[in-house]
Image (cartoon, rainbow, N blue to C red):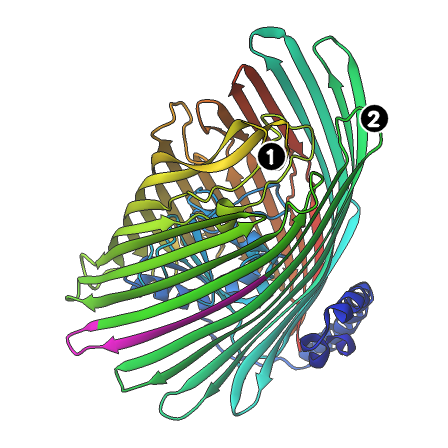
Amino acid sequence: MHSFLSIPWVLGPSHANLHRCVPVVLTRLNLGLTLALAATLAQAQTTSAASSAQVQDMGQIEIKSNRDNDTAVRRESTAAKIVIGREEIDKQGDASLGEVLKRLPGVTIQGTPGRGGAIRMRGLGSGYTQILLDGQRVPPGFSVDSLTPEQVEKIEILRAPTAETGARAIAGTINIVLREGQKSSPDDFKVGTSIEQGQVSEQVNWVHNLQTDGMNGTLTLSAFDSRKPDDVSTHTVAEVQASPAAKTDRTSETVSLALRQGIHANARLQWRGEQGTSLVLMPFLMYSDYTNQGRTDLRQTDAAGITTTDSATSATQSRFVMTRLNGQWSRRLSDDDLMEVKFGLGRSTYNYQFTQIENGSSGLLPNRAQNQDFTDLSNNLSGKLTQVLKNGHQLVSGLEVEGVNRNETATTSVTDDSGNLKASTQRFAIYSQDEWKFNERWSAHAGLRYENIVTSGSSIDVERRNTSSVWSPLLHALWKPVPSSRDQIRMSLTRSYKTPTLYNLVALPSLSVETNSPTRTDRVGNPDLRPELATGIDLAAERYFEGGGLISANLFRRNITDLIRYTISQVNNPTWAPGQTRWVSSPHNVGDAVTQGLELEAKFRLNQVWVEALPVDIRSNMSFFRSRVKDVSGPNNRLDQQPDMTANLGADYRLRSAPFTLGGNINYNPDYSTRLSETQGAYQGAKKVVDVYGLWRYSAVTALRLTVSNLTPSDYITGSSYSGNGVSETARTTHRNWQNVTLRLEMKI
């Protein structure tokens, strides 16, 4: 099986070679899994026989969990930080990092269960959560959900921003640290097959620890062949308000099959020199091919009772390639002073083609042909100086420079030259922070950060430019009422912000795939957007248990100004559709908002609170959210896509009489409605996702894992509504989803 996993093949392919090699790699997974199972079962039988012949009493052995170290880091950090290490990341046997994140306190994943989606903290929408990769902002087009758990060393969650990590984090920050090399550890190799609604997917993961004296490092490789069926139906009712009898009823159903093949490879290579000098290089490659073939059937009954049917076939093809090199150079200037320089260079290319061909002649599903090709070039450079003073202060000061340039060519069915776009974003930041300990009871963390962002873009003969700058004062405090106890109180007062995205500002007109209407709008950007600003307060109480585990309660509030929200309007004679009147959705600053909530978390072994109980590991969290957009009348004038609450309950138990571990998790988000404006509304259905697993460790180096994700699938329902300008329209969409069963072999080699 090593023949197709050789390092030179992974690190040096052209795009064409990758396209040819990916299917070859993945078609061998089933054969590889069968052979590896046979070999390791034979090894297990041999080991079992040998151990039966000779049994030696080793006495009492104490095993300490890595979770204890993660908990200690969380406890000692002055700024609120949650650390999730390798043990917890690996526990459930997830196929994607998004599945791991959805079980963490206050984190939700948008979209249909099992399909991935945007990562949210505290129920807040896209852009409120800052995502970092090894402490640096993720490059354009990067999806955290595309990472596999095997690529990640740990996950850090910061509920309030700091000057060093950045203030573009109204909801919080998620920092993903990629795998670190360990000389003493063997390689990890995992190969698995999953099935969902009769469609088979395959995945292989390999983590190689480099064994050289001059360099410490690791190489991680993931290859996958994923097949996902989809079944989505939408029921739309539209009527003219002056004549309720003039009603149109419309139902469409789209059935499709999505295929995704790809390779992800990343490495961390570290050299240590004299006088505390070190250099770390982190190359990263992501390659993904995606195809989707679908069919849409539509049935519409108009006000006169005449029923019309239509159908269309669609085809989507896309390819995403990202190469990136991050680096970090550090040197200890003295015993108390450390200088660090980070840099990054990246290139991303994306090619997208969508074709819809109408099978009938009604025009309800018009022919569409859309293409998009873009290249992003990104770079960043930052420097940081850390000074430890004799009076207990630790000063950290730094500056950051980042640039992103996009060159895009896109076409629609309206005009051939409507998609040319050149855009760039330039960011500059400078910060300073001080962390110090007053006494055994009190410690504090104060910082100030300034950030300036300039976004510019040109499309056809239109040039757009947007500049924003923000000062962010930040203050954190930690109080231990009794220094020797395990109880403590955290307090934070911060200013954070959310900037408009490049797409918000300079997005090209995007036409609706179906007939244009208030719930099937065109979309376009707005270059006059201002950043959202938020003043926040956090207050938390924590208790840490002897031997690991904790309970915590966290209160938060954010007052937001210049909230950005997409609003719908009618536009006469738009440039992308001359002579027509179109329903158009575009972003605007709509006023002020407030959000607040309570986050509860408990992690412990059951026998820590009940001596006679089994040593079952319990993981639980529950969050309650409330929000209000002041310029929108209630009820349900909440922030976009923020549920009233989220909850997780998980448990893991290793049998004493056999090498089996059993576990599972329940993730629940209730349904809710949102009033977006005086004319717009949205609905999100409830999501209850149950995941269970069993792990059979039949030797010291080999294990077999069975995971059932989405054990009790139920339809996921979303909706939208519009009432204004003399018309009323509601749309309700049902997304089907299914169980996913995965069998995976895990080996240390």
Asked whether 708 or 616 is in front, the reply is 708
Query: Which residue is farthest front?
Result: 461
Disc number for residue 361: 2
Label 1 or label 2, whichever comes before in sequence order: 2
Q: How many marks?
A: 2
Majority secondary structure of magenta residues: strand
Q: Is residue 565 magenta?
A: no
* Residue assigned mark 1: 522
Q: Residue at x 39, y 93 (%)?
A: 274
Q: Position of residue 548 (x, y in %)?
A: 39, 62
Element at badge 1?
strand
Q: To which quarter of the image does residue 387 belong?
A: bottom left
Q: Amino acid at mark 1?
A: Asp
List x then y, in percent, for residue 27: 82, 64
Residue 454 drawn above or below residue 437: above
Q: Is residue 378 magenta?
A: yes
In this picture, residue 145 sits left or right of residue 745: left
Other residues around mark 1 within 10 Å, as few (<14) / some (14–19) / many (≥20) = many
Q: Residue 576: where, in percent of width, then height?
A: 62, 37
The boundaries of the magenta stretch are 376-393
Q: Is residue 432 above or below residue 272?
A: above
Residue 360 occupies which quadrant of the picture?
top right
- Badge 2 crowding class, 10 Å Cα cut-off, few under 14, some 14 to 19, many 20 or more, is few
Q: CA gap, disc 1 to disc 2? A: 23 Å
Image point 76% across, 22% down: which residue? 299
From the viewer's perspective, tell me whether residue 120 is left or right of residue 265.
left
Q: Residue at x 21, y 62 (%)?
A: 444
- Amino acid carrying label 2: it is Ser
Q: Position of residue 572 (x, y in %)?
A: 57, 27
- Can residue 119 be seen? no
Residue located at (79% from left, 19% from top): 308
Of residues 155 and 696, the one nearer the viewer is 155
